[in-house]
Image (cartoon, grey):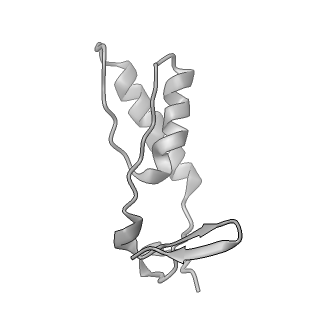
Amino acid sequence: MIDEYACSNSPEVACWLKVEDQAKREALWLCKILEQNFGNGLVICGCPHTLSFAFRLLSAGFETKACYYMPHHKLRVFTVSPGTANRTK
């Protein structure tokens, strides 16, 4: 069973996120970035923010690339391809 309120207590890979809290956090990050005067930058954030924050940066006129790291082999996550299921070691 997935623990809706404390995903760190759940043995499953999926968990619920409070979208409103995440949106407020990203809006604050963007405001802080817009206050600065620089040519290049690097944003390090959690995986759930990767695309949504990249979209915010693009909308604000920044040239943006997004990359995330997820150590599936350390998390013991199953990878599934069409027609097959493989467990990473």
- Location of residue 75 by image quarter: bottom left
Q: Is residue 35 above or below residue 16?
A: above
Q: Position of residue 5 (x, y in %)?
A: 52, 74
Q: Residue at x 30, y 13 (%)?
A: 39
Name the quarter where the C terminus is drawn: bottom left
**Residue that sits furthest to the right in the current view:** 83
For this rendering, which residue is in front, 3 or 43?
43
Name the quarter where the N terminus is drawn: bottom right
**Residue that sits furthest to the front in the current view:** 83
**Residue that sits furthest to the bottom in the current view:** 1
For this rendering, which residue is in front, 51 or 88?
88
For this rendering, which residue is in front, 70 or 38?
70
Q: Position of residue 83 (x, y in %)?
A: 71, 71
Q: Residue at x 51, y 73 (%)?
A: 13
Q: Residue at x 40, y 58 (%)?
A: 70
- Location of residue 28 by image quarter: top left
Q: Is residue 53 above or below residue 20?
A: above
Q: Position of residue 26 (x, y in %)?
A: 46, 39
Q: Position of residue 10 (x, y in %)?
A: 48, 81
